[in-house]
Image: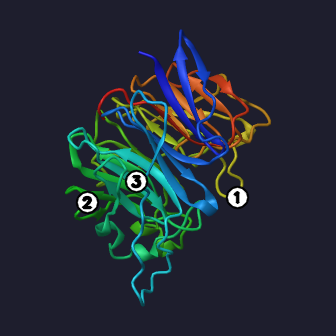
Amino acid sequence: MTAQAFIATRKGLFELMKEEGAWRLSAPHFPGDPVSIVLHDGRDGATYAALNLGHFGAKLHRRDAGGTEWTEVAVPVYPPKPDGSDDKTDWTLKQIWSLEAGGPDQPGVLWAGTLPGGLFRSADRGNSWQLVESLWNVPGRSGWFGGGYDTPGIHSICVDPRDSNSVLVGVSCGGAWVTNDGGNTWALRTQGMAARYMPPELVHDGAAQDPHRIVRCAGMPDVLWCQHHSGIWRSIDNGMHWEEVAAPASSFGFAVAAHPADGGTAWFVPAIADQQRVPVGAALAVNRTRDGGATFDTQRDGLPQRDCYDLVYRHGLAVASDGATLLMGSTTGGLWISGDAGSTWQTVSAHLPPVYATRFAAHTPQ
């Protein structure tokens, strides 16, 4: 089977194909347009690309399995803000920040996380969308605030492979929320997290937490990994409780990838926190744990080790279904791939546009 991955960048969507042992990049789809996120749906083979066209707004395109043409489909639309509302959030779609497929028993169901913090659901492959009002209307939602953006946003959507009605989402800044009934009701799941950028009395406030990215181990679904603004956390009970772990050099970063079968294995890209947001020592590295965060090893082989200021965004690190192939893209257009679980890396390109997201094609149902 031909391996395939997607790279969403500020100047288009690239495809990466492995043919006869060599990785090759395609010419870009949507050349010149910012592509904020990409999804390949293993249930029917469709690919979705979300564009952020500034003055022209957010757009969403779908390419069906075996096809070459892209079709524009609907985008999430917020309802009008009620008259007299004291909510300071602008109820207007700014960006589609995350896209995930529903469960294998939910053909056509898609989830979209957006700026300014709304979660949307589609039951017809993106032809129409409905705001998940139960989450939008949770008490305190108007107090969510922006992390990397001026407005809050949902960047992580983790569907439980055992139960399609169980979904966890991560909000910057608004914590982690879980539904077990398909989105009818939600519960805040941040016990153990610490927002050390807040005043002391708000450090453990659930809605003040800034999870940069949350991912689930598909083969051990109760295991979740979180790269948080204040460090790294792991849960082994589907987010009921979180335990902090410490990585070498720095536990700050944005990206995390979880092994698809081994709940003890995950990868992170360390950086210097807050104002600098560059690799530690101007040398790019990947921290890997294989024992649930008890220990980490730092991988550098094949990555630039001097004069390097590449940052890896939230969706910039991906792991394939084999658990051994990883893909990483940076803000300065670097793209690296590893075939040995991150021990060594090969440069695919050093000259791409800034990379917003990397993603492997899903060849089997999620």
- Judging by the rendered image, the residue that carries numbered circle 3 is 112
User: How many other residues sit within 10 Å of disc 2, few (<14), some (14-19) or many (≥20)?
Assistant: some
Between residue 13 and residue 352, name the one nearer to us: 13
The percent coordinates of residue 252 (x first, y second) are: 58, 49
Q: Are marks 1 and 3 in contact (CB under 8 Å)?
A: no
Separation of marks 1 and 3 at Cα, in angstroms:
29 Å
Quadrant (top left/top right/bottom left/bottom right) for the N terminus: top left
Quadrant (top left/top right/bottom left/bottom right) for the C terminus: top left
Q: Residue at x 54, y 41 (%)?
A: 247
Q: Nearer the viewer, mark 1 or mark 3?
A: 3
Q: Secondary structure at mark 1?
A: loop
Position of 223 compared to 71: left or right?
left
- Judging by the rendered image, the residue that carries numbered circle 1 is 275
- Residue 136 visible, this orientation: yes
Between residue 65 and residue 163, name the one nearer to us: 65
Position of 81 compared to 365: left or right?
right
Separation of marks 2 and 3 at Cα, in angstroms:
13 Å
Q: Amino acid at mark 1?
A: Gln
Q: Earlier in the sequence, mark 2 or mark 1?
A: 2
Q: Secondary structure at mark 3?
A: strand
Q: Amino acid at mark 2?
A: Gly
Q: Earlier in the sequence, mark 2 or mark 3?
A: 3
The percent coordinates of residue 51 (x first, y second) are: 55, 50
Position of 228 compared to 83: left or right?
right
Q: Residue at x 42, y 55 (%)?
A: 74
Separation of marks 2 and 1 at Cα, in angstroms:
36 Å
Report which quarter residue 171 is drawn in: bottom left
Q: Residue at x 63, y 47 (%)?
A: 33
- Judging by the rendered image, the residue that carries numbered circle 2 is 183
Between residue 63 and residue 18, name the one nearer to us: 63
Residue 342 vertical position relative to residue 114 in the rendered view, above or below: above
